[in-house]
Image (tube, rainbow, N blue to C red):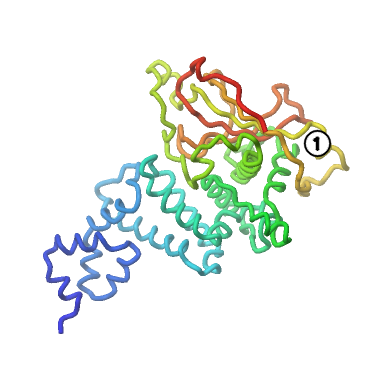
Amino acid sequence: MASSSTHLLRQPPEVIHAILVAVEPTDLARLSQTCRELRDCIANDYLLWKRQYLEHFDCPASHIDNETADSFWQARLKDLVRVDKILGSDNTSLKNEESSLEEVYSIAMSLLTESTSKPDKNSAFLARHFCERESNIAAFLARSSLFASARYPADTPASNFALRQASAKLFVYYGLEIEPPSFSVSAGKATAVHPYARSRVYDLRRYMATNMWGPFLDDGSEGVDWEKVQYILIDILYSFRQSTCAQYNRDVFNLPFDGLAPDSHTSVPPSRKTAAKDPYGVTGTWMRIVCFLDYSDLYGFNFGSPPLDWSEARPPIETREALRLIRLQLHVTRIDEAVQIGGINSARGVLGNWFDKDYDVHGPAGPTYFWKISDDVSPALAGAGAGG
């Protein structure tokens, strides 16, 4: 009796192609192992690989050279299938391998830099895996140095600086809290994350000329230090949830990997004159979160005890901080440094640090977060924010 694959291969090529397009990408490899004819059929159908990719992921924004296009779609889809299997696995040992972190980070960043604001299949793919599995949060989002003391005992920082930075950046792009449940903390099974993040944000030793007094590397290279950005985001997210401002609802506070695509902030286009002077879309009306400790708490935390060695971390801060939600209008007048999350003019916004205009090593200082709500600069959009 003829096998089912034989019956399938008797169909016209366009029918076989249409059938294979409907197969899940993870099943193509299994299907190609059933017989030599199907293996060759799948391997040589370059349009199949492209259609499979575009069915499940956004079209890459970068130009794809015609000479390498066929191999590009096949290679990228195979990479994504491999990452899909890692993220969907129940094998925590596999996930905790640092090679898995390296691979997931590399593919995730490729997806997120190529994502579009709509429909954003790339972000949806990652969101599905990270919302459904705590093991993915532990293995890929909780591997920075912060988690040596915080969250669950099993959470372990990666062994090298590059991977700790990769995990922190992936967390920042994820964009949601990963605090253990309160019952787990109260039962002594876990440790809250935000007090440790807050401690690092308000440790004034960490701000110096070489890192431009912000979330940048200490070596003077002006590169982003994603662990510092992670501390800022964790602290702000927690304080925002606890404040009276939490009623201000926006998707990027609730949806993982949201608002990262370039130009995902949408508004009425600015005039040509404004666009020419402001190619990065700074001018407009913005919302801003500013957090700060009572100055006596800040001073006591930093200077109220004998000086610590630089390598010694300050204790976690359980003290609540104040939070202000401010609406403001910005024009380009000078350049200051902060970290854009995602592409240029993304809906996610900008994270950084604030200081008093007359900088003092004793503070005050704290974390801040900006996001744009309109390209217009209009008196009707101006107004006071809220506090909490």
Q: Nearer the viewer, residue 226 or 364?
A: 364
Residue 72 at least partly seen:
no
Q: Is residue 128 left or right of residue 320?
A: left
Image x and y of residue 367, in percent: 66, 35
Report which quarter residue 221 is drawn in. top right
Q: Nearer the viewer, residue 148 or 71?
A: 148
Q: Amino acid at mark 1?
A: Asp
Q: Is residue 202 above or below residue 356?
A: below
Q: Which residue is mark 1?
A: 297
Q: Is residue 118 left or right of residue 383?
A: left
Report which quarter residue 357 is drawn in. top right
Q: Is residue 191 left or right of residue 297?
A: left
Label 1 neighbour load within 10 Å: few <14, some 14-19, many 20+:
some
Q: Is residue 257 above or below residue 278?
A: below
Residue that protrudes farthest toward the bottom in the picture: 1
Q: Residue at x 52, y 60 (%)?
A: 133
Q: Residue at x 46, y 63 (%)?
A: 86
Q: Residue at x 78, y 48 (%)?
A: 315
Label 1, secondary structure: give it: helix
Quadrant position of the C terminus in the picture: top right
Image x and y of residue 378, in percent: 49, 16
Q: Residue at x 30, y 66 (%)?
A: 28
Image x and y of residue 72, in percent: 31, 53
Image x and y of residue 92, in percent: 55, 67
Q: Nearer the viewer, residue 279 or 201?
A: 201
